[in-house]
Amino acid sequence: MAREQPPEDVSVRSGTEVADACEEVERLGAVRSREATVFELLKQLLALFEFLRILHASRG
């Protein structure tokens, strides 16, 4: 049986390169998570302002 050759775009990485890549993925994931949290907070703040606008309009 002949050994199957890996695709041309596959390369062997050192343990340090893999660890660095994993750290970068974790960092990017944390940034995305913070961005999502900030976006959710902004949406809630916008909803609060809309509620206050409606409340103010109904009183006056």
Image (cartoon, rainbow, N blue to C red):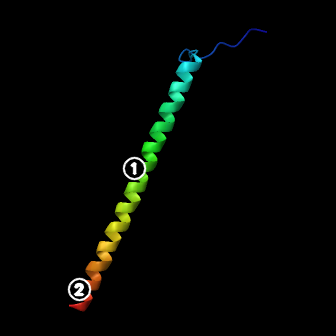
Mark on residue 50?
none
Q: Residue at x 51, y 37 (%)?
A: 26
x%, y% of residue 30? 47, 43
Tell me the kind of residue under disc 1.
Answer: Glu
Q: Residue at x 72, y 10 (%)?
A: 3
Mark on residue 57?
2
Distance from label 1 to label 2 (Cα)?
Answer: 33 Å
Q: Residue at x 56, y 23 (%)?
A: 18
Q: Residues within 10 Å of mark 1 (few under 14, many from 20)?
A: few
Vertical relation: 36 (above or below) 58: above
Q: Residue furthest right?
A: 1
The reply, left or right, for residue 25 in relation to residue 54 is right
Q: Quadrant of residue 4?
A: top right
In which quadrant of the rendered image does the N terminus lie?
A: top right
Vertical relation: 15 (above or below) 1: below
The reply, left or right, for residue 3 in relation to residue 36 is right
Vertical relation: 14 (above or below) 34: above
Tell me the kind of residue under disc 2.
Answer: Ala
Identify the residue under disc 1. Answer: 35
Judged from the image, the secondary structure of the residue bearing numbered disc 1 is helix
x%, y% of residue 14? 57, 16
Vertical relation: 52 (above or below) 43: below
- Dot placed on the residue nearer the N-terminal end, 1 or 2: 1
x%, y% of residue 9? 53, 17
The reply, left or right, for residue 31 in relation to residue 60 is right
Q: Residue at x 38, y 67 (%)?
A: 44
In which quadrant of the rendered image does the C terminus lie?
A: bottom left
Q: Residue furthest top?
A: 2
Judged from the image, the secondary structure of the residue bearing numbered disc 2 is helix
Q: Quadrant of residue 49?
A: bottom left
